[in-house]
Image (cartoon, rainbow, N blue to C red):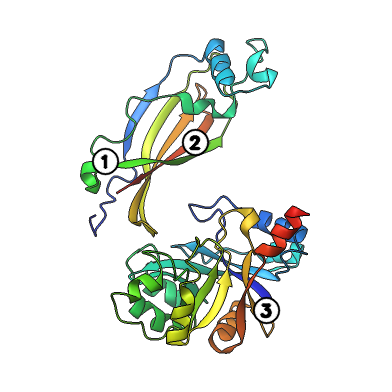
Amino acid sequence: MILDLHTHSEASEDSRAPVETYLKWLQRKRAEVPIDGLVLTEHRQWDPHADYRALEDKYDLLILRGAEVETDYGHVLVYGVNRDIARRFDFTNIRLSAAELIPAVTDMGGIALPCHPGRPTVGLCAHYESKPAIEGVIAVEALNGGSRRGENERVQALIDRYGYKAFGGSDSHLVSFVGICATEFDRDIGSVDDLVSELREGVYRPVDFRANLAKRAAS
Amino acid sequence: MSLNLDKSLIGSEFDHTEFPPVTAEHIREYAAAAFETNPRHLTANDAELVAPPTYVVSLRGRHFMPGNLLTVLNLRRGFDAGKDIECGVPVRVGDVLTATSTVHDIYEKTGRSGSMVFVVLRTKITNQRGESAAVIDQKLMMR
């Protein structure tokens, strides 16, 4: 099963992508971007009332929700957000403590994973140069669709040194970027609980569909 | 940059301006400058002439932002980070438009270049009947 674990819709202030337009795009690009669903990880927010079940049924794609928060070790994707997590952490705070957030989210039933670790200032690699490693990190976003040249390449050393698992996400803010990078899981995922469980214990790997799109565009 | 961002300006009104009646000449000038080709914006008679949807951004109130914005936020500089326009009823010749501007939001985020503050200035434009002609959210990125 393949999911894009890092997407932003128009609910994020820097995105212009409606969720349904993502789904329409994925339907059209099925051959080049064969993903089964996406996770909406809006910036610094969690809306407990958002409900995409009707769109899931209409487009036969899984839509899960998480959040991208900002910490003293860079940006972190939080999956399995629940009332306890949202109550304990102010997602609008751009100075959350990663050392506090990551284990606490695990304790409360979710999982928090650093994203775009190779990015300056907001990536884990930059912070590890001057600060100790964080306990409890299980995986990092080794393949980020919004990364610039060299940023994804920096992550391999981090993975080699700390033994982190690797996942991928598009970090799409525009419709045509959805699914360009994603994560392939060995097992099926049908809910956010499944996702958290698989990210913790399962087998998965980043997958890159940019070559498919480029090949199609060139033909 | 301050670690405790002062958001006290959120909700404060900093400009309220009533403009002279919209003229056909101004609509046509704006449409031509925006490379519009639709005759509704250019060659229709005055009674049927309609301003292009983005016409409202050509309206300038007396104050672009609160005079004390930089002081309150303890920031030194910024730049235009884009605007969103929610269009309302069409603007026509003779409409008397009023713009009311408030500080809609202040928030922080971090990116490759470090932390930054975004200020959203919301301008609501209504016509002489109180109908919404547009809601413009102007973003400023500051640090």
Quadrant where the N terminus of chain A sits is bottom right
User: Residue A21: where, in percent of width, then height?
Assistant: 67, 54
Vertical comparison of A84 with A20: above or below: below
Say which element carries label 2: strand
Q: How many neighbours does mark 3 have within 10 angstroms: few (below 14), some (14-19), or many (20 or more)? A: few
Which subunit holds the residue at mark 1?
A: B
Disc assigned to residue B124: none
Residue at label 2?
A: B135
User: Residue B16: where, in percent of width, then height?
Assistant: 36, 27
Comparing marks 2 and 3, which lies closer to the viewer? 3
Residue at label 3?
A: A190
The answer to whether mark 2 and mark 1 are in CB contact below 8 A is no
Q: Residue at x 65, y 78 (%)?
A: A184
Q: Is residue B17 visible?
A: yes
Q: Is residue A81 visible?
A: no
Residue at label 1?
A: B69
